[in-house]
Image: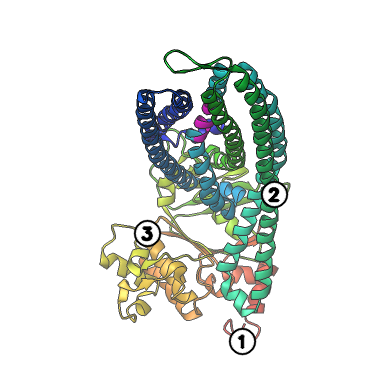
Amino acid sequence: MVFKTLSKSVREYKASAVLTSLFMVGEVMLECLIPLVMAQLINGLGGPSMSPVVKFGCVLIGMAMTSLLCGVLSGRLAAKAATGFAKNLRRDLFYKVQTFSFGNIDRFSSAGLVTRLTTDVTNVQNAFMMIIRMAVRFPLMFCTALIMAFAINVKMTCIFLGIVPVLGIGMGLLIAKVYPMFDGVFKKYDALNDSVQENIKGMRVVKTYVREEHEKQKFERSAEDIRKTFTRAEKLIALSNPLMWFCVFAATLLISGLGAMLTVKSFGGFDAAGDPVWGELSTGEIASLFTYIGQIFSSLMMLAMVLVMIIMASASAKRIAEVLQEKSEIVSPENALTHVADGSVDFCGVDFAYATDSEKNALENVELHIKSGETVGFIGGTGSGKTSLVQLIPRLYDVRGGCVKVGGADVKAYDVDALRNSVAMVLQKNLLFSGSIADNLRWGDENATDEEVQAAARLACADEFVCGFPDGYDTHIEQGGSNVSGGQKQRLTIARALLKKPKILILDDSTSAVDTRTDALIRKAFRENIPDTTKLIIAQRTASVMDADRIVVMDGGRIAAVGTHEELLCSCDIYREIHELQNRDGGEDAA
């Protein structure tokens, strides 16, 4: 199943892979025939005529050059096929990840996906090159050399048959010991990548708390764990070299001894034409047998190395296949709806959990109905379920029970792209991409004009600081938006969402880094300029939601209360406590 899944990525490089193997077959056959021709050349050296030497010498040169050409073509085609296969594999993995829901990504983790796209693909690429070249070359060379040796002398070849099982059993034991080490090391790679990612993302925090040494030690532990595992594996693999040479030297001694006796006993002088007369074994044949010794044992040795590489890559192949075979939890149904009628949202008895096997729900029996164009605020403590609730609207996750409706229809009935194009969501973690400010804003609408870009920025109160930059909207944004402040980043991401002209706008604590004055100006702009858009605002500050049409108070994954600011101050202890804590010292700025 794994092989079938990965083989689909070979595609246009199938011809190169097949030709690689064919040229390799040609190279091996010529290499195995050369010793036979060389035996004829050696046997003809004792005669009075040089014509056999010239004849067989020319044949040897021609065979050697042809074998070299086959080897060169095989190498070039193998490189093309392997690198092309790796390119397609990375493309297929990346495209597959784009179809994943948040639940799919949570199962693999970002560090695990990075390892699969890099280290695992490289291992599979190397194994693929080994398979189409070496895995063809060495079994074929072993069988051909063994047949040629049998054709020369059966007695001498029996020495091979006695030595080969020793090497085979030894290599089998080594491979059985090494495989579990390679199989487990990639999980350690995931941990290492996770440590690096976490450190880079949190670099400001690391430096603020002077935790560089702690992070170095954590990285060192992960790297040292990988080093120890590979060291143990390589030490075991290294034992294969002395094992092979023991078998080679043993076979060489036995063949030398037996061959010397057979050669001396079988030499019958020269015939009338001056050619040597041999009985059971000639000098040229004994020389050929030594050549076949090298070919047989080097084939076994290299085949063992290829098997180790394939075994190591099989763990990577399995991990890659897991991603390619993963089915997205969220797909568009047949005959899906492609038009969202309006911005109304209905939560009908919704239950939700992030893990399918979780015993505890993140949301429990949520019943809420929001009219199109309404502004609804969500407030509550950390972990109360605010973000979990709004993530169900664009189907970033699916509900466990009940249903979510947008525009009067179940979100599962919509084409996923059509639904998400009608919903703009500004997440808690604001992300800007490297490029100009205008390019970042056009993620909302790639065809937006300069006027539309500037209008969206004005609504988000971003135009005032963008125009203050020397290059204005052409100002370059560093990766992650590291060259703008947190508040500026939030306003730019709000502007990006507004460019989508959505029916539903979700702001998930996306004005937390903005001062209260600017926050109020943004909300005022929304009321005046996009009255028909449904606005869902998640906030920590009551000031950010107090002028909403309704405020939903969340607690423990349930709706604790729904009402206006004034109503909740009178009827909801949770809301009143949050408001009083934030205004205890004379205003939210003080809080």
Q: Nearer the viewer, residue 274 or 302?
A: 274
- State the image quarter where residue 414 is shown: top left
x and y percent of residue 488 in the render? Answer: 44, 75
Disc 1 residue type?
Gly
Q: Earlier in the sequence, mark 3 or mark 2?
A: 2
x and y percent of residue 94 in the render? Answer: 46, 47
- Asked if the residues shown at circle 3 and circle 2 are in contact, with their CB atoms under 8 angstroms apart, the answer is no
**In the rendered image, which residue does mark 1 sit on?**
586
Q: Nearer the viewer, residue 497 or 134?
A: 134
* Circle 2 SS class: helix
Residue 337 visible, this orientation? no
In the current view of this chain or complex, which residue is farthest to the front?
Answer: 272
Q: Residue at x 41, y 55 (%)?
A: 503
Residue 338's label in the rendered image is: none
Nearer mark to the viewer, of 3 and 1: 3
**In the rendered image, which residue does mark 3 sit on?**
444
Nearer mark to the viewer, of 3 and 2: 2
Q: Residue at x 70, y 55 (%)?
A: 228
Disc 3 residue type?
Gly
Q: Decide: few, some or many residues near mark 3? Use Cα within 10 Å; few <14, some 14-19, many ≥20.
A: many
Q: Decide: few, some or many residues near mark 2? Use Cα within 10 Å; few <14, some 14-19, many ≥20.
A: few
Residue 64 visible, this orientation? yes
Mark 3 and mark 2: Cα distance apart in space: 55 Å
Magenta segment range? 134-141
Q: Earlier in the sequence, mark 3 or mark 1?
A: 3
* Circle 1 SS class: loop
Q: Residue at x 41, y 39 (%)?
A: 75
For the C terminus, the image quarter is: bottom right
**In the rendered image, which residue does mark 2 sit on?**
235
Q: Earlier in the sequence, mark 1 or mark 2?
A: 2
Q: Nearer the viewer, residue 123 or 576?
A: 123
